[in-house]
């Protein structure tokens, strides 16, 4: 990107790819193309045919189109829509059907004619599926073919629901969903077991027939598959790689989704780079991984054989560079995440003074805190820092009905045993509300409140294991979450205000936060933006200048070694304690895709894998060998 001085990377990339600093910028560009098409077609008295996608990715594009409709008079009266796919076996009214998604996110909010909005029929009897798929293809042809196709991408490399194994000549058909895709959808369906096993999707050939294609991708979770689709061979293993065949396909992605492209990840392999300190660190640590050698054993040949000869010319010898990089990595390690009192801190990640520190841990949902930094939190508390954990959202959407039912049954029984009319009345009300909403309804306020409280109890028991007094836990219940649903959240000033108030009250010396590099519409991604706004609004407050911000990675992700500014090692006992803390979040055992599974497929604790992997990575650099490490990156507030 910026550091690359020529365009040699283009030789590696088989699909034109534009990297945007924000998803909003990318969406504005795609919205421009859609507007131009609609306007040109209208002038010619013809319809514009759009192929649209579901998922979080296109939501901001749809919001931008809705805005242009409301504020700039963009009309969709001459637009025909064909959506990519639909779950098989869901009626259109099902809260997770793509029909309902499109209606709520776009169709009902602009002047599209209902008869012009097509999705594959997910409710068609099995024996009619084939005919229905044919009819869908024919309808597209009759409309004149798709002018602009919008795509997201699944972590399996799927476009639409063309899972690995899909061929470039495939057409609209019934397919079986990949297990990773079902896991990724588990959160929407409150458990993987509820995710349909099949879907109807346009085929790869149907997609390739579109005259113009934009594929959008945000967040780190998509980085690997984007690199494979753009730089790899065309293969059925990554159906998106077949987009390389298309003459007019552009990938519009954000920086996080671009992070595995060679020009970003290993720019020295595709051209001249400016050797900034961060780039040197990234390159040398990569070299150690690539050669399988600890830092202090790298030799000149290793550098010159891996595109880094010019670095040696600039820096002198491998010997000096190795030592410098070793020391830099060594200095990230600390057992004192709040700073070590009375220590010389010239090489420590966190300063010694002031002590104790007011440490604020921001957890987008209950569980993120312990899952990602439970060991560090425990240390901060035991080292007598003044720790506050703030849960930004209640997390009530991630509680399955079965868990609420258990508590309601307990309340009913308790009410009966105690013969308390009031208690019984309330328990019965909850019981009725839960039944009334059924499988498809949204949780009414009382049920959401109950579910949020269940998550509070889990947070408290997990905090107990970390010696954290429950008075130190703050539940902010940010309004954007309480008033929204996944993929429809719309934070506003009231969310930012609530965080500003907390910051003002605590005046933290250090903040631990997450959400950087996440999908911008995910809960951590939105929470991070709220933090950014709250910090921007607090710039004039004296505490801001003395506050360090430490970023932790959300569940299912971890910083790479070159990104780590603070590495907090955990002993085997501390690590075990953290794992026990994670297990207090009973309602979450099947909920979030990123929490992951172990080999038995029945636990949600991938944290152990990630923390151990970081420890092994440090060990492989030639540093001390620890059981596990929690990693943090320092955020420059002004970036
Ligand atoms: C689903 C959809 C795809 C979409 C993918 C990614 O599988 N069928 O069309 O691209 O999800 O979803 P998200 O945008 O939420 O990451």
Image: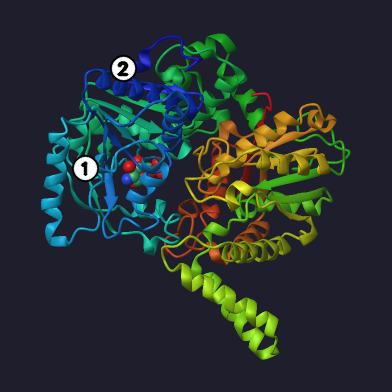
Q: Is residue 36 above or below residue 547?
A: above
Mark 1 lies on residue: 202
Q: Residue at x 29, y 30 (%)?
A: 232
Judging from the image, what secondary structure is the residue with disc 2 in? helix
Using the image as rendered, state which of residue 270 and residue 385 is in the foreground: 385
Q: Is residue 20 above or below residue 553?
A: above
Please identify the quarter of the rendering in which residue 282 is found: top right
Q: Residue at x 59, y 41 (%)?
A: 491
Please identify the quarter of the rendering in which residue 217 is found: top left
Q: Is residue 7 above or below residue 374?
A: above
Mark 2 lies on residue: 11
Image coordinates of residue 636 in percent, x first then y, are 68, 27
Q: Is residue 568 above or below residue 12?
A: below
Using the image as rendered, state which of residue 436 and residue 590 is in the foreground: 436
Q: Is residue 553 left or right of residue 127?
A: right
Image coordinates of residue 162 in percent, x first then y, are 25, 44
Q: Earlier in the sequence, mark 2 or mark 1?
A: 2
Q: Is residue 13 left or right of residue 441?
A: left
Q: Is residue 611 left or right of residue 634?
A: left
Using the image as rendered, state which of residue 86 and residue 161 is in the foreground: 86
Report whether the residue tagged 2 is closer than 8 Å to ligand 1. no
Please identify the quarter of the rendering in which residue 84 is found: top left
Q: Is residue 209 left or right of residue 33?
A: left
Quadrant for the C terminus, please.
top right
Image coordinates of residue 582 in percent, x first then y, are 60, 60
Image coordinates of residue 311 in percent, x first then y, are 52, 14
Q: Which quadrant of the render holds ligand 1?
A: top left
Mark yes or no: residue 325 visible: yes
How far separated are the C-alphas under marks 2 and 1?
A: 31 Å
Q: Residues within 10 Å of mark 2 (few under 14, many from 20)?
A: few
CB atoms of marks 2 and 1 within 8 Å = no
């Amino acid at each position: 990107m910026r550091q690359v001085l020529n365009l040699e990377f283009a030789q590696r990339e088989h699909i034109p790819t534009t990297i945007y600093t924000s998803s909003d910028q990318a969406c504005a560009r795609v919205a421009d193309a859609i507007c131009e098409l609609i306007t040109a077609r209208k002038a010619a008295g013809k319809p514009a045919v759009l192929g649209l996608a579901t998922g979080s990715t296109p939501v901001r594009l749809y919001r931008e189109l809705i805005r242009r409709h409301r504020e700039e008079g963009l009309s969709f009266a001459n637009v025909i829509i064909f959506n990519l796919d639909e779950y098989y076996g869901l009626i259109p009214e099902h809260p997770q059907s793509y029909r309902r998604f499109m209606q709520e996110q776009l169709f009902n909010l602009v002047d599209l004619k209902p008869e012009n909005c097509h999705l594959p029929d997910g409710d068609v009897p099995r024996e009619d599926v084939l005919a229905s798929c044919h009819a869908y293809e024919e309808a597209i042809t009759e409309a004149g073919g798709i002018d602009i196709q919008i795509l997201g991408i699944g972590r399996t490399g799927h476009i639409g629901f063309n899972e690995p194994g899909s061929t470039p000549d495939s057409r609209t058909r019934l397919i079986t969903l990949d297990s990773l895709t079902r896991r990724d959808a588990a959160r929407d369906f409150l458990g993987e077991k509820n995710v349909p096993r099949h879907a109807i999707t346009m085929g790869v050939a149907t997609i390739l027939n579109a005259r113009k294609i934009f594929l959008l991708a945000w967040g780190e979770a998509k980085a690997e598959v984007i690199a494979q689709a753009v730089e790899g061979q065309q293969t059925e293993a990554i159906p998106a790689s077949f987009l390389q065949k298309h003459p007019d396909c552009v990938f519009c992605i954000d920086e996080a989704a671009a992070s595995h492209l060679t020009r970003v990840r290993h720019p020295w392999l595709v051209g001249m780079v400016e050797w900034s300190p961060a780039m040197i660190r990234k390159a040398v640590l990569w070299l150690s991984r690539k050669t399988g050698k600890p830092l202090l054993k790298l030799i000149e040949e290793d550098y010159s054989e891996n595109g880094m000869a010019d670095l040696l010319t600039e820096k002198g010898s491998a010997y000096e560079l190795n030592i410098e990089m070793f020391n830099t990595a060594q200095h990230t390690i600390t057992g004192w995440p709040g700073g070590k009192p009375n220590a010389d801190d010239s090489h420590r990640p966190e300063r010694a003074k002031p002590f104790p520190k007011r440490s604020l841990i921001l957890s987008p949902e209950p569980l993120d805190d312990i899952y990602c930094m439970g060991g560090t939190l425990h240390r901060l508390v035991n080292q007598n820092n003044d720790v506050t954990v703030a849960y930004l959202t209640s997390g009530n959407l991630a509680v399955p009905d079965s868990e609420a039912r258990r508590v309601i049954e307990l309340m009913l029984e308790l009410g009966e045993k105690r013969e308390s009319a009031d208690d019984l009345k309330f328990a019965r009300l909850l019981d009725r509300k839960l039944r009334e909403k059924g499988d498809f309804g949204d949780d009414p306020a009382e049920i959401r409140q109950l579910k949020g409280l269940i998550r509070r109890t889990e947070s408290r028991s997990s905090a107990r294991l970390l010696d954290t007094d429950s008075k130190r836990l703050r539940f902010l219940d940010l309004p954007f979450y309480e008033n929204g649903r996944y993929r429809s959240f719309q934070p506003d000033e009231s969310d930012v205000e609530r965080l500003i108030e907390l910051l003002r009250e605590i005046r933290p010396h250090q903040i631990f936060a997450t959400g950087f590099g996440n999908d911008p519409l995910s809960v951590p991604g939105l929470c991070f933006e709220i933090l950014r706004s709250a910090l921007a609004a607090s710039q004039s407050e004296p505490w801001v200048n003395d506050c360090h911000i430490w970023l932790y990675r959300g569940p299912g992700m971890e910083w790479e070694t070159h990104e780590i500014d603070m590495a907090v090692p955990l002993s085997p006992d501390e690590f075990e304690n953290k794992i026990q803390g994670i297990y207090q979040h009973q309602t979450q055992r099947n909920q979030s895709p990123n929490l992951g599974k172990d080999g038995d497929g029945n636990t949600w604790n991938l944290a152990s894998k990630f923390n151990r992997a970081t420890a092994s990575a440090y060990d492989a650099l030639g540093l001390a060998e620890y059981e596990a490490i929690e990693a943090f990156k320092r955020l420059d507030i002004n970036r």
